C-alpha cells in the first residue's frame, strides 16, 4: 500500500479521517467544516465513544461536505500518547477501512503540535503493519480475501516524506519476514528460501549460498545430520551488508534458525500442532527481513546475516536418537533427541560466522523451544546473553518498538545438564522438561567463542493465533524492528 503526504488544504478522498485526542473537542479543521455541528452531535450521541485509543465513530458526511463519510479516530490523551499507542490506533484504523471496503482515504493531522510523538509516522506504521494479508494462495475465493485499502493520504502541516521513507524500508523488511514465515513448506524449502535471499542483491547485499558439498567441506556435521533425513538438500546463506567502510572490522552477526519444516525427525512430533512447524524457519525469516531493511535504508553498519536452512524429516536416511555427530567446531554431539534440531543447525552456523567474520556481537534468533511458549506465551520472546551490555541494549530497543523480550538465566548448573555419557555434549537437558529453554541456550553457548552473544528464543512470538493491534493473525515478523532499532541506536550511533 502507498502513502502520500500533502498539505492540509488538499482534502480530496471520499473518506476523511480526523483525529480526536479527548472526546470533548473536535480538531480545528473539522470544526471549520462542521458548521451545523452534525459531526459534533453524532459523536455525542455515540455513548460508547469514550475517547479510548483506537476508538472510532463513523458519520455519513452532512450536506455540504465533499466527502461521503467522515471517521473520527481517537488517539488517546495528549500526555499519555506514545509511539506504540498511536501505532495501535493506526492499526485499528486500517482494520476499519478494510471492513468498510475503502480503498483510499485522507488522514487529517492538524493536532500534531500538541503531541510529543510523531502522529503521522506512527499512524502510518500502524496502518501499514495491520494492513497485511497473506492471500496469494486463494484462487476461487480471491476477492473475499483481498484487502481494499491501497492508499492513505496524510494531510498535515509538516513534511514527513523522508522520515517515512526510512520507516517504509523497515516495514518492508517486516513484510518480507511475514511472507517467508507464512509460505507453506512445500513451496519454501532450503533451496527456494535461498533463492528468496538472492533477491537482496538488488539492495546491495552480498549473498553467498553454500550448498551441501560446501557444507560437507566445512565439516558442518551437526547441521548436515539434521538435513540427512530429507529429500530437500540443506543450504546456508550468508547475507552481507557493509554500510560502514570506515570501520570494516566492526561486524554484527545475525544468525537465524531456518528449519523450513520440523516434523521432529525420528522423534516424530504428535500430529496435533505439527502443522505449526512450517514457521520453524522464523529466525531465518527475521534475519532475512532485517538485513533487507538495513540495506534498503542504507544503515551505517556492517551486518552479516547467516541462516541455516534444513528440513527435519523422518526417513530411512534420517539421523537416529543416540547418533553422534561432529560439529564444525570439532566438538562431538550426542543426538539424544532428533527434535532438538535447531540447536544443532545453529551450532554450525554460529561457528562458521565467528571463524569467518570475527563479529563483535552475535545475535541469534530461533523458534527454539516449546518451553519458551509455556514460560512467556506469545507476547515476550526469551533473551539469553553472556553480555549484560548487549542484553540491556537489546531490551532498550525492544521497549522502543514494542517487541518485548525478557531475559532468562544461564548458569553452569544448567550447562552441566548437557554433558553426555558418550560425546562432548548432548542436545537435550537432564531434568526432564525443566528449564528447557535455558538448556537449549546453554547448548548454543558452547559454540560461542569470545564475542558478545545474545540468543532470542522467538518460538512463542513468531506467529499470532488471534492477531494483535498492529498485526493480523498469522506471522508477526517479530524481531525485524527490534534488530533494526538495536543497530540504529548502538552500532550506527557510534559509526
Ligand atoms: N521447533 C521446535 C520448538 C517450537 C515449539 C517452536 C513450539 C515453535 C512452537 C523445536 O525444534 C523443538 O522441537 N524443541 C523441542 C526440544 C526438546 C525435544 C528438547 C521442544 O521444545 O519440545
Ligand atoms: Mn524440533
Ligand atoms: Zn525446531
Image: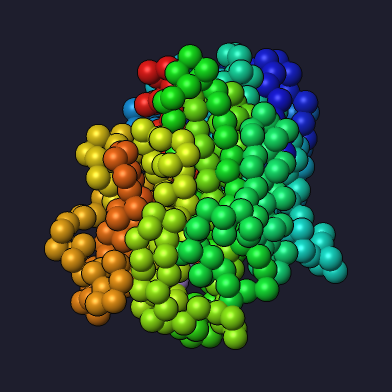
Q: Where in the figure is residue 46, as x and y percent of width and height?
A: 52, 47
Picture quarter containing residue 358? top left
Q: How is the image coloured?
A: rainbow
Q: In this image, 243 relative to 97: left or right?
A: left
Taking depth in this image into account, of 326 and 127 the one nearest to the observer is 326
Taking depth in this image into account, of 97 and 335 the one nearest to the observer is 335
Q: Where in the figure is residue 229, as x and y percent of width and height?
A: 58, 76
Q: Is residue 395 above or below residue 225?
A: above
Which residue appears farthest toward the left when viewing the image?
A: 413
Q: Residue at 22% of width from left, 39% of height from top?
A: 388
Which residue appears farthest toward the right when viewing the image?
A: 140
Picture quarter containing residue 413? bottom left
Task: Tell me if residue 324 can be seen.
Answer: yes
Q: In this image, 394 relative to 284: left or right?
A: left
Q: Where in the figure is residue 169, as x and y percent of width and height?
A: 61, 32
Taking depth in this image into account, of 205 and 426 the one nearest to the observer is 426
Which quadrant, please, contains the N terminus? Answer: top right
Q: Where in the figure is residue 263, as x and y percent of width and height?
A: 54, 77
Task: Tell me if residue 269 can be seen.
Answer: no
Q: Is residue 341 above or below residue 395?
A: below
Amino acid at each position: 500500500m502507498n502513502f502520500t503526504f500533502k498539505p492540509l488544504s488538499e482534502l480530496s478522498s471520499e473518506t476523511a479521517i480526523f483525529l480526536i485526542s479527548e472526546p470533548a473537542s473536535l480538531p480545528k479543521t473539522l470544526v471549520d467544516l462542521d458548521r451545523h455541528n452534525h459531526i459534533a452531535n453524532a459523536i455525542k450521541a455515540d455513548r460508547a465513544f469514550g475517547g479510548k485509543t483506537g476508538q472510532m465513530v463513523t458519520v455519513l458526511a452532512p450536506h455540504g461536505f465533499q466527502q461521503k463519510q467522515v471517521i473520527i479516530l481517537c488517539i488517546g490523551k495528549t500526555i499519555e500518547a506514545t509511539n506504540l499507542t498511536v501505532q495501535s490506533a493506526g492499526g485499528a484504523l486500517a482494520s476499519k477501512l478494510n471492513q468498510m471496503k475503502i480503498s483510499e482515504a485522507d488522514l487529517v493531522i492538524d493536532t500534531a503540535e500538541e503531541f510529543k510523538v510523531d502522529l503521522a509516522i506512527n499512524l502510518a506504521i500502524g496502518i501499514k503493519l495491520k494492513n497485511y494479508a497473506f492471500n496469494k494462495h486463494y484462487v476461487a475465493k480471491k476477492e473475499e480475501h483481498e484487502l481494499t485499502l491501497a492508499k492513505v493520504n496524510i494531510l498535515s502541516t509538516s513534511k514527513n516524506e523522508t522520515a517515512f521513507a526510512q520507516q517504509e524500508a523497515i516495514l518492508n523488511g517486516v513484510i518480507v519476514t511475514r511472507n517467508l514465515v507464512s509460505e507453506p513448506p512445500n513451496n519454501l524449502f532450503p533451496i527456494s528460501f535461498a533463492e528468496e535471499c538472492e533477491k537482496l542483491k538488488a539492495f546491495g547485499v552480498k549473498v553467498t549460498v553454500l550448498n551441501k558439498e560446501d557444507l560437507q567441506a566445512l565439516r558442518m556435521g551437526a547441521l548436515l545430520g539434521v538435513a540427512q533425513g530429507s529429500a530437500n538438500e540443506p543450504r546456508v546463506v550468508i547475507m552481507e551488508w557493509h554500510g560502514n567502510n570506515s570501520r570494516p572490522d566492526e561486524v554484527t552477526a545475525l544468525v537465524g534458525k531456518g528449519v523450513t519444516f520440523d516434523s521432529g525427525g525420528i522423534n516424530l512430533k504428535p500430529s496435533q500442532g505439527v502443522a505449526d512447524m512450517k514457521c520453524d524457519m522464523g529466525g531465518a525469516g527475521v534475519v532475512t527481513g532485517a538485513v533487507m531493511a538495513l540495506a534498503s535504508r542504507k544503515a551505517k553498519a556492517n551486518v552479516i546475516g547467516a541462516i541455516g536452512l534444513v528440513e527435519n524429516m523422518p526417513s530411512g536416511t534420517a539421523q537416529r536418537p543416540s547418533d553422534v555427530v561432529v560439529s564444525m567446531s570439532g566438538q562431538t554431539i550426542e543426538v539424544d533427541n532428533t527434535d532438538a534440531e535447531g540447536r544443532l543447525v545453529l551450532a554450525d552456523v554460529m561457528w562458521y560466522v565467528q571463524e569467518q567474520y570475527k563479529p563483535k556481537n552475535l545475535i541469534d534468533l530461533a523458534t527454539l523451544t516449546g518451553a519458551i511458549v509455556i514460560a512467556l506465551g506469545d507476547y515476550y520472546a526469551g533473551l539469553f546473553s553472556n553480555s549484560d551490555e548487549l542484553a540491556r541494549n537489546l531490551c532498550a530497543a525492544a521497549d522502543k518498538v514494542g517487541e518485548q523480550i525478557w531475559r532468562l538465566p544461564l548458569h553452569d548448573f544448567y550447562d552441566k545438564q548437557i554433558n553426555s555419557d558418550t560425546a562432548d555434549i548432548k542436545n537435550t537437558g537432564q531434568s526432564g522438561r525443566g528449564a528447557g529453554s535455558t538448556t537449549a541456550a546453554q547448548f548454543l553457548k558452547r559454540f560461542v567463542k569470545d564475542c558478545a552473544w545474545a540468543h532470542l528464543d522467538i518460538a512463542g512470538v513468531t506467529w499470532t493465533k488471534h492477531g494483535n493491534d498492529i498485526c493480523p493473525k498469522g506471522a508477526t515478523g517479530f524481531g525485524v524492528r527490534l534488530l533494526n532499532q538495536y543497530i540504529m541506536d548502538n552500532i550506527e550511533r557510534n559509526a
